[in-house]
């Protein structure tokens, strides 16, 4: 069972307890790296990869890390070294994947709007699997393979139209979603591909959404797809590959019961094992290849975002904690109404533990001029937090730093990787001066 935010603990030090990630003090780190910044644990990432491999590999299920969750090169290198494949959605991601050490044949290219230029670059690079999302994309890919006389392997992403209990912005396998094709579009695509000398369709792919906490929608979707595959087999189209996507859920709001000198412990969530067993049980006689594309479940719990309190603003009915982090640094609350657990970096005594501290409810906000720049409402936090205190958002390893932007002309936050007692800068903060460099006025030569 992967623990959420493992390797995070309070340690007593000089009349205080402070938060440590592995053997690095967050407080000390914040004296060298401007807040807000992201901070990841290498050990936590290795744990997750280990758990994932232990669950899926014995069931002969291949793992392709969905790098949209976090595409920092240093983290990608760790994932590649552990032997996982990778799922990409743009040519920018392909360049990162190759640069991090993934082999081209271990890359799956997903995405509903791959351009002709992107498909060409991927074909020439030797990408191992193209997940096609329309007959229009199929036509473009066939013409590229004809032009360059390159063999490619493709899967058709279907929309199994299952109901998934998750936020409306992250369902992808329900009726009306832009992703994948309807079941009745598969046969015509197979017929078209039959005439291609270079493109072979080997199977079907699905990705039904993200933050899925039960195995039921996977079982529903697999059952529907299996019926379709049997029908297609009977018509002479043997499909031997199934890519079941990602989506395995993570609990963001679990407030850990942090006690002195102990690791955070949190309520359990569904483990990789549960998904692996469900998949295997749904496909008892399957002889072909199965793969999955987890993103969030490998990355979310490896990182925290560190921010400083700018003001504790007294107000009615609720006082505000105004942080120096904002929605440009951490978009998930504004985008998905997500709440990340928030804990103080310093506890103001040797003995204090959050579970026994006097708590006050605060609305936690950033400085951006948007009401959606609100991280959480009525959040119980120690009553004695004050301006200048450092705070940590938990579970910020996935879909956080990758989405950061410079709205309100704010810098882009740094990312740090902790490995035992060492800390490494793995992305410098990008300053306004650097961003302004890209806005130098220059005339375009239109002829
Ligand atoms: C095609 C595809 N595969 C995999 C993933 C990864 O999903 P998750 O991070 O929820 O595991 C996504 C996420 O959007 C996706 O679009």
Image: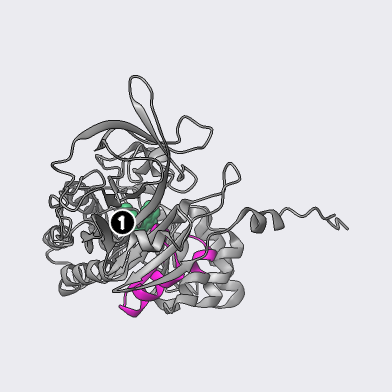
Q: Which residue is mark 1?
A: 300
Q: What x and y, as percent, mark residue 148?
A: 59, 76
Q: For this rendering, which residue is in front, 273 or 35?
A: 35
Q: How is the image coloured?
A: one colour
Is 412 on the left or on the right of 243, as rendered?
A: right
Crowd class of label 1 (few under 14; some 14 to 19; many from 20; radius 10 Å): many
Name the residue: 52% across, 57% down: 137
Ligand 1 appears in which quadrant? bottom left
Q: Quadrant of the C terminus?
A: bottom right
Q: Is residue 380 above or below residue 42?
A: above
Q: Tag 1, which secondary structure?
A: helix
Would residue 79 be counted in the magenta stretch? yes
On the image, which quarter does residue 354 sit in?
top left
Q: What x and y, as percent, mark residue 74?
A: 42, 72
Q: What x and y, as percent, mark residue 414?
A: 48, 60
Name the residue: 52% across, 37% down: 368
Name the residue: 15% across, 56% down: 260
Is 217 on the left or on the right of 150, as rendered?
A: left
Q: For this rendering, which residue is in front, 154 or 70?
A: 70
**Is residue 238 among the parts visible in the rendering?**
no
The region drawn magenta spans 68-94
């Amino acid at each position: 069972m992967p623990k959420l935010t493992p390797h995070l603990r309070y340690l007593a030090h000089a009349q205080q307890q402070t938060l440590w990630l592995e053997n690095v003090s967050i407080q000390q780190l914040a004296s060298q790296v401007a807040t807000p910044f992201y901070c990841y644990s290498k050990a936590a990432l290795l744990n997750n990869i280990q758990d994932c491999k232990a669950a899926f590999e014995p069931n002969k299920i291949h793992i392709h890390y969905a790098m949209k969750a976090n595409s920092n090169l240093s983290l990608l290198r760790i994932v590649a070294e552990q032997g996982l494949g990778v799922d990409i959605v743009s040519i920018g991601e392909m360049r990162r994947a190759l640069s991090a050490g993934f082999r081209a044949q271990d890359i799956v290219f997903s995405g509903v709007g791959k351009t002709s230029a992107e498909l060409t670059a991927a074909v020439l690079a030797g990408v191992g699997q193209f997940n096609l999302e329309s007959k229009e994309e199929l036509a473009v890919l066939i013409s590229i393979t004809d032009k360059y006389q390159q063999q490619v392997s493709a899967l058709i992403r279907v929309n199994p139209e299952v109901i998934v209990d998750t936020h409306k912005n992250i369902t992808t396998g329900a009726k009306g979603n832009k992703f994948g094709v309807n079941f009745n579009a598969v046969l015509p695509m197979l017929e078209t591909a039959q005439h291609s000398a270079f493109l072979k369709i080997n199977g079907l792919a699905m990705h039904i959404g993200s933050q899925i906490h039960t195995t039921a929608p996977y079982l529903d979707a697999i059952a529907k797809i299996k019926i379709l595959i049997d029908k297609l087999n009977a018509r002479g189209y043997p499909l031997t590959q199934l890519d079941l996507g990602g989506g395995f859920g993570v609990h963001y709001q679990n407030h850990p019961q942090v006690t002195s000198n102990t690791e955070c412990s949190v309520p359990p969530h569904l483990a990789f094992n549960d998904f692996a067993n469900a998949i295997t049980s749904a496909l008892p006689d399957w002889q072909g290849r199965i793969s999955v594309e987890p993103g969030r479940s490998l990355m979310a719990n490896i990182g925290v975002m560190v921010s400083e309190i700018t003001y504790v603003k007294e107000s009615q009915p609720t006082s505000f904690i105004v942080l120096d982090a904002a929605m440009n640094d951490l978009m998930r609350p504004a985008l998905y109404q997500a709440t990340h657990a928030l804990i103080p970096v310093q506890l103001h005594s040797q003995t204090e533990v959050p579970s026994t501290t006097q708590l006050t409810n605060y609305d936690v906000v950033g400085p951006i001029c948007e009401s959606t720049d609100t991280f959480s409402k009525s959040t119980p936090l120690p009553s004695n937090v004050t301006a200048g205190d450092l705070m940590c958002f938990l579970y910020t390893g996935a879909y956080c730093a990758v989405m950061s932007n410079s709205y309100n002309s704010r810098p882009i936050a740094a990312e740090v990787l902790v490995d035992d007692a060492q800390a490494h800068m793995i992305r410098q903060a990008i300053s306004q001066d650097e961003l302004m460099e890209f806005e130098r006025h220059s005339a375009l030569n239109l002829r």
